[in-house]
């Protein structure tokens, strides 16, 4: 293993590895807030400052080595970094990292269905922050048209799962694909514009 490879190898328990594994598991961009809630529920409290430092390191490492970063973030259709940050994998196609109006509910649906499924099968009292994240994601996935009471049973959680899954089932079964707006935005951003497709315009 070369010195460069050694430097770029992260410890299995590093914050970077935890975020990478989360994104690989969900196969979808995840907001900083959601990353913090999920990792904290897993027993790894994650202050926002640590994620900010991780983001800075990913960009600095790329600028120094020009090697594809493990992590980057989503962009608006104009190529500007989305704020607050949504994390993504550096290896993902640009299409998957453009946050358009038609894909945002799908990202929330991915988060909501996964969390509802996990909470439905969890024994004991669920982490309240994780439960609230699941309910907020479900509401956002349904375009803010429906609010949910805190479930008290597995059946309740799976009921919310089904409500969110139904209108998004095609997209949820093809998470590496894109929406019409994403394809249009990618086409425009791929034209020579002198911007960083990993981290966006500065």
Image (cartoon, rainbow, N blue to C red):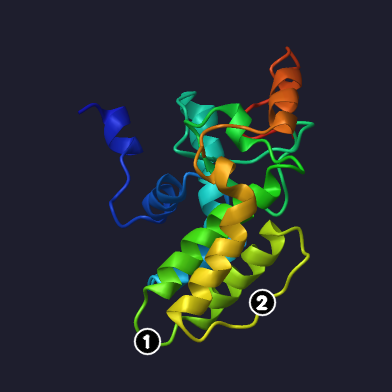
Mark 1, residue position: 124
Disc marking residue 100? none
Instruction: Classify 5 as above or below 58.
Output: above
Q: Position of residue 162 (x, y in %)?
A: 55, 62
Q: Position of residue 110 (x, y in %)?
A: 55, 53
Mark 2, residue position: 148
Contact, CB < 8 Å: mark 1 with mark 2? no
Identify which residue, 50 or 131, lies in the foreground. Answer: 131
Crowding around mark 1 (Cα neighbors within 10 Å: few <14, some 14 to 19, many 20+) is few
Q: Position of residue 137 (x, y in %)?
A: 63, 63
Q: Looking at this rendering, what residue extends furthest in the top direction?
A: 192
Instruction: Classify 168 as above or below 43.
Output: above
Asked whether the viewer can see residue 120, the reply is yes
Q: Is residue 118 left or right of residue 100?
A: left
Please name the residue shown 69% across and 33% down the image.
200
Going from N to C along the chain, the mark reached first, 1 or 2, is: 1
The C terminus sits in image quarter: top right
Asked whether the viewer can see residue 45, the reply is no
């Amino acid at each position: 293993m070369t010195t460069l490879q050694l430097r770029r190898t992260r410890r299995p328990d590093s914050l970077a590895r935890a975020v990478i594994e989360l994104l690989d598991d969900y196969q979808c961009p995840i907001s900083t807030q959601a990353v913090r809630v999920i990792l904290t529920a897993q027993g790894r409290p994650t202050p926002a400052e640590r994620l900010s430092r991780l983001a800075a390191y990913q960009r600095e490492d790329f600028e120094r080595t020009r090697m594809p970063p493990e992590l980057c973030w989503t962009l608006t259709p104009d190529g500007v970094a989305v704020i607050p940050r949504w994390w993504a994998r550096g290896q993902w196609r640009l299409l998957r990292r453009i946050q358009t109006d038609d894909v945002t509910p799908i990202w929330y649906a991915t988060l909501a269905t996964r969390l509802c499924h996990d909470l439905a099968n969890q024994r004991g009292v669920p982490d309240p922050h994780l439960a609230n994240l699941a309910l907020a994601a479900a509401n956002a996935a349904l375009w803010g048209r429906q609010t949910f009471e805190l479930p008290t049973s597995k059946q309740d959680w799976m009921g919310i799962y089904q409500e969110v899954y139904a209108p998004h089932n095609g997209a949820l079964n093809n998470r590496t694909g894109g929406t019409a707006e994403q394809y249009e935005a990618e086409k425009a951003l791929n034209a020579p514009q002198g911007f960083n497709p990993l981290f966006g315009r500065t």
